Amino acid sequence: MEPVKIGIIGCGNISGVYFKSAKRFESIEVAACADIIPERSEAKAEEFGIPKVCTTEELLADPEIEIAVNLTPPLVHGPVGIAALEAGKSLHTEKPLAVTREDGQRMLELACEKSVRLGCAPDTFMGAGLQTARKL
């Protein structure tokens, strides 16, 4: 089975964990990375052997990329996620899904309309500390 090609958008602090972890899975391949600061994506591509550095728009237009991984700052999770879903990409985004209910709802609607998957990394919110606080 060919690995699913993913593209990482946002090459800041958290991205290193994603780039490193992705190498542990034969089922995925990081095929491209993008960042609003080109030097950051270039540095990550060199460090982790990523074959393509591009803009977010180029990454989302690439037909080989099946899954976009959104590691941008939370304020742009919604707009970047919406753009990825509109491009027909499945999307995994860091928390929060979006900062407005409207953007989050639009993302859910687009995932259904485009028949793609949408996932979020809610581990901090689902962790024991916050769940205990919620129960209290």
Image (cartoon, rainbow, N blue to C red):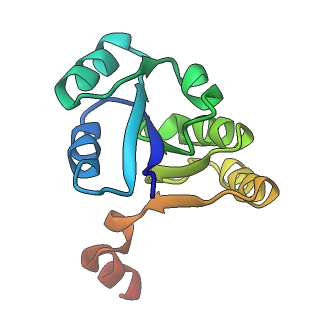
Q: Where 68 sits versus 60, above or below?
A: below
Instruction: Tell me the residue at 77%/52% (across/down).
Output: 114
Q: Of all residues shown, which one is farthest toward the front? A: 1
For this view, does 107 lie left or right of residue 21? right
Query: Quadrant location of residue 81?
Result: top right
Q: Where 108 sits versus 40, above or below?
A: below
Q: Position of residue 80 (x, y in %)?
A: 59, 35
For this view, does 1 lie left or right of residue 11? right
Instruction: Tell me the residue at 54%/27% (across/down).
Output: 59
Query: Quadrant location of residue 39?
Result: top left
Q: Of all residues shown, which one is farthest toward the right? A: 113
**Number of disc labels:** 0
Q: Nearer the viewer, residue 59 or 15?
A: 59
Instruction: Tell me the residue at 33%/29% (across/down).
Output: 11
Instruction: Tell me the residue at 26%/41% (across/down).
Output: 19
Q: Position of residue 12 (x, y in %)?
A: 29, 30
Query: Quadrant location of residue 61?
Result: top right
Image quarter (top left, top right, bottom left or bottom right) of the C terminus: bottom left
Q: Nearer the viewer, residue 4 or 78?
A: 4
Q: Nearer the viewer, residue 6 or 72?
A: 6
For this view, does 119 lie left or right of residue 78? left
Q: Position of residue 76 (x, y in %)?
A: 54, 34
Q: Position of residue 130 (x, y in %)?
A: 32, 74
Image quarter (top left, top right, bottom left or bottom right) of the N terminus: bottom left
